[in-house]
């Protein structure tokens, strides 16, 4: 007489996981990124996000180099820790600025959907004159 173990089938497991996952609310997070911009020696970059929704939203702003690395806050004398995560009220903005030359781009992530956010990279030369403004897509 052989003995059989009661092992749940793989399909039963997948059905159970599907029910659990479908019943779990997931916050919709959206990302927008600017094109890279070549910041000259002595220049700086300012990444600014605006909340277009009717409710406060959590926004994360990242200043990155051409290779996709976070620009170090200490080395670039950033205005805040990079990345910067804050709750932004409706119609309000959240910026982070970093000094230094090289290619830079901004990455914005918001909980609440892509239409809740607009972001922009603004580049400055060594005399603090605006030399470029790029919207996030």
Image: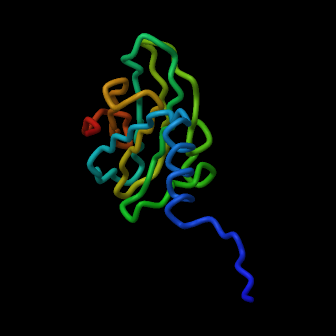
Q: Is residue 128 above or below residue 35?
A: above
Name, please, the residue furthest toward the front. Answer: 1
Residue 68 located left or right of residue 36: right
Counting the numbered discs, the total is: 0
Q: Is residue 4 above or below residue 91?
A: below
Image point 40% across, 44% down: which residue? 107
- Front position in the image: 33 or 45: 33
Residue 111 located left or right of residue 133: right
- Front position in the image: 87 or 34: 87
- Across and down, in percent, residue 122 comes to 33, 35
Name, please, the residue furthest toward the bottom. Answer: 1
- Across and down, in percent, residue 13 comes to 57, 59
Image quadrant assignment for residue 2? bottom right
- Snapshot colouring: rainbow
- Across and down, in percent, residue 68 comes to 41, 60
Image point 46% across, 47% down: which residue? 63
- Across and down, in percent, residue 17 comes to 55, 51
Q: Is residue 98 above or below residue 102?
A: above
Q: Quadrant of the N terminus?
A: bottom right
Image point 53% across, 66% down: which residue? 10
Image quadrant assignment for residue 137? top left
- Front position in the image: 24 or 7: 7
């Amino acid at each position: 007489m052989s003995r059989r173990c009661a092992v749940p089938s793989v399909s039963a497991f997948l059905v159970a996981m599907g029910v659990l996952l479908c019943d779990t609310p997931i916050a919709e997070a959206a990302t927008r990124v600017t094109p890279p911009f070549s910041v000259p020696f002595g220049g700086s970059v300012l990444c600014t996000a605006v909340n277009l929704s009717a409710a406060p939203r959590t926004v994360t702003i990242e200043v990155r180099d051409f290779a996709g690395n976070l620009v170090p806050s200490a080395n670039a004398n950033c205005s805040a820790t990079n990345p910067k995560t804050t709750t932004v009220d409706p119609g309000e903005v959240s910026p982070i600025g970093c000094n230094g030359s090289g290619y830079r781009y901004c990455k914005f992530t918001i909980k609440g959907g892509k239409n809740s956010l607009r972001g922009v990279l603004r580049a400055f030369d060594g005399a603090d004159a605006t030399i470029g403004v790029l919207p996030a897509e």
